[in-house]
Amino acid sequence: MHRCQPPDAVVWPQNVEQVSQLAALCYSQGVPIIPFGTGTGLEGGVCAVQGGVCINLTHMDKILELHLEDFSVVVEPGVTHKALNTRLRDSGLWFPVDPGADASLCGMVATGASGTNAVRYGTMRENVLNLEVVLPGGELLHTAGLGRHFRKSAAGYNLTGLFVGSEGTLGLITAATLRLHPAPEATVVATCAFPSVQAAVDSTVHILQAAVPVARIEFLDDVTMDACNKHSQLNCSVAPTLFLEFHGSEQVLAEQLQRAEEITQDNGAFHFSSAKEAEERSRLWAARHSAWYAVLALRPGYKGYSTDVCVPISRLPEILVQTKEDLKAQGLTGAILGHVGDGNFHCLLLVDPEDPEELHRVKAFSELLGRRALALHGTCTGEHGIGLGKRQLLQEEVGAVGMETMRRLKAMLDPRGLMNPGKVL
Amino acid sequence: MHRCQPPDAVVWPQNVEQVSQLAALCYSQGVPIIPFGTGTGLEGGVCAVQGGVCINLTHMDKILELHLEDFSVVVEPGVTHKALNTRLRDSGLWFPVDPGADASLCGMVATGASGTNAVRYGTMRENVLNLEVVLPGGELLHTAGLGRHFRKSAAGYNLTGLFVGSEGTLGLITAATLRLHPAPEATVVATCAFPSVQAAVDSTVHILQAAVPVARIEFLDDVTMDACNKHSQLNCSVAPTLFLEFHGSEQVLAEQLQRAEEITQDNGAFHFSSAKEAEERSRLWAARHSAWYAVLALRPGYKGYSTDVCVPISRLPEILVQTKEDLKAQGLTGAILGHVGDGNFHCLLLVDPEDPEELHRVKAFSELLGRRALALHGTCTGEHGIGLGKRQLLQEEVGAVGMETMRRLKAMLDPRGLMNPGKVL
């Protein structure tokens, strides 16, 4: 959806001093600065809409500090979440936030990423303890103070939170101190098919209300299941489906699984199966994480575009039913899947890149869906960010005083408007 | 420690429109504005150091919206956390953040409160979804957009996070949308005495590393235990002690309890006992929450002052041992207790209000302790806030660029410096 606009130059700094010098130089010369991590964002956050210098941070890829007893780690911006978890293997700890793509952790900070584990472990907002940020003019800010990695604080304004989700528009994140979690002793995955979207969502609410500490609870609609069956050789029902994951001791897992099965069956589920072995679990999650490619494979040659709204969980059934009807009315192919425990879902739309009329319909559908979410007290983006395409929706979401406050924040930290221009505001 | 300085006037608005009119009037006339909730804060946040108008928000005490399926609630500033939980009784949900005092929820937002349950349920930072804020000039800001109560969002800058912990210096919080949690099916409390502080902290780390989802894990030193024994008629060992609480199903609780007992015994604990009955549990937590009064009772007529540092958990043993030595060296009476799972602890100091020299020693001790925490990569305040007395420590904690960024934030939202002046910065 967002045509790539290249920068005038790309630089690969090796350390924070070089980032600081580059920022100071660009800023003094009036040159736009575009931070770049892995480029896996979905909202055009790295497009150089006004040209300028792309600062590619992937060469800064060291894990600087690892504090196992304190459940924290300090990473440079080139470290991805998979690389971190590989390093943590056998440590008994892990970093659970997983947006699907193997994104860089500082890029995940910048977009406020979340993903499938957020329902239990939180999003990036809840898992960042401190940030090293090069401000637009080159100054170095440690949002919680240099070298600090405490679990909580009430000291002054929450500068860390200000940069999480700022999409590169307030500064360059050159190191992140993250919170680690104990690795689960054992894991079990379950899948479950339902006669309706309502039954799947009701099950989700009841599971959460019963305080079952579900680690993942993912919704896949009939179109997604059909695509996954074909692409990943699954043999699941083509129906609204939940993929669930539980973490804990063997005994705890058995209990959680039993409760979830009871709840889903009370809601009319017609198929509940579970998998304990690592191989079968991996196969199911690989299918879930390949859903994007599975759906793309439905129409070879087509491009994909993902919506990303989030609503109060009780409003999910109606917006999902509406969305299905909208797809039909617009003659669009779309598959729905989402992090249903958070009320966040994506509609993966297929579009013929040679057909400007279809592209137009996809954009109109996406805006309509954003407005439907706003009307239900929701947000136009649960985890992908505003980027280039949702700036109008952001205005409708936060209102005039909210926008004015955000603009003043931007002007305060980036008075010349050179940090990743054209994004968010 | 903070002598009360009265305002020139106190007003009791009945609704947000009146708050907005009051703010606009005061601001246009250059009159300082001091928001007031329950006045239970410990860092002098409601002192009217420059006079002005105290806006007492306790008459606005309605629960405006309750969304049980969405796990959220909207409260006016006069609602306390106990009042909310009374209303939620029998709903299957609760609001877990509990700072000890029956503080107002919007006041807890303003100070970024946490307390005993934070190790499992997070602090206010993790439990606020949206805020209605009257800005200093009277404008109304909805930090996440009017009426929105989604679980997560990546839409623009995190304005909600900016006001959590802002201590009334950026605006008046007139409503808060909070995240609710499922009430635990069953609860068990355990107490456990140790031969040393190190053994108690090691047990804490091992319990957290073992992914035992402990709901509370509180440390009480020998002085605190002695005071609690006397004041609350307990019969516990006078030794470093942990109070633990577990939430879950009966089966899960049995397993958690067994694990915790094994871990503490591996670390040399010499007494482990548990209580399931509500009465006995209440008695233990009442003793913990009365610790302040129990310690005060050690020296009738004395006043209490509480420190509030937080360090990476691995550094707790050394700072606790140092603190004990400092108390001895300074000839001060102090009891130590804390939220050890977060690395946060308090030293309750007793001071003769008629003895300016002792008062001076208490202040010097408190500053020394703050600097010890900073040297160990910690913070000078885990949950009480900066208020009046820790402004110098905040500068040392966040550094020059951090302070400059905070000052610019303050100047952006409150250019005339009239919102709760003299606090934080």
Image (tube, coloured by chain):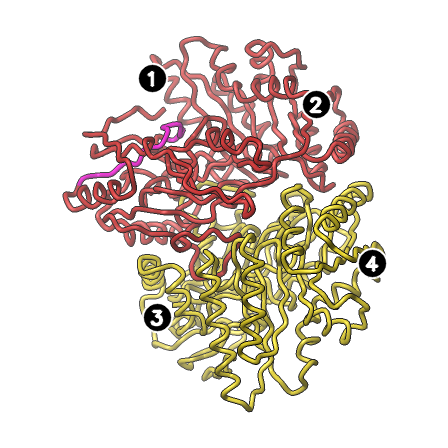
Chain colours: A red, B yellow
Quick one: SS at disc 4?
helix
Element type where label 3 sits in the image:
loop
Instruction: Return the mark for residue B278.
Output: 4
Q: Compute the Cα span from label 4 to label 3.
A: 49 Å
Q: Which mark is residue A356?
A: 1
Asked whether the viewer can see residue B286, the reply is: yes
Instruction: Measure the C-alpha gap from mark 4 to mark 1.
Output: 67 Å
Which circle, 2 or 1, is nearer the viewer?
Answer: 2
Q: Nearer the viewer, mark 4 or mark 1?
A: 4
Does the residue at mark 4 contact the one at mark 1 (Cβ under 8 Å)? Answer: no
Count of residue discs = 4
Query: What residue is pinned by disc 2?
Result: A276
Chain bearing mark 3: B
The chain under label 2 reads A
Q: Is B155 left or right of B116, judged from the image as shown?
A: left
Please tell me the numbered disc located at residue B417.
3
Viewer-nearest of labels 3 and 2? Answer: 2
- What's the residue at 60%, 12% (across, down)? A229
For this rendering, which residue is in front, A89 or B83?
A: A89
Residue extent of the magenta highlight? A31-43
Counting from the top left corner in percent of width and height, residue B273 is at 81, 56
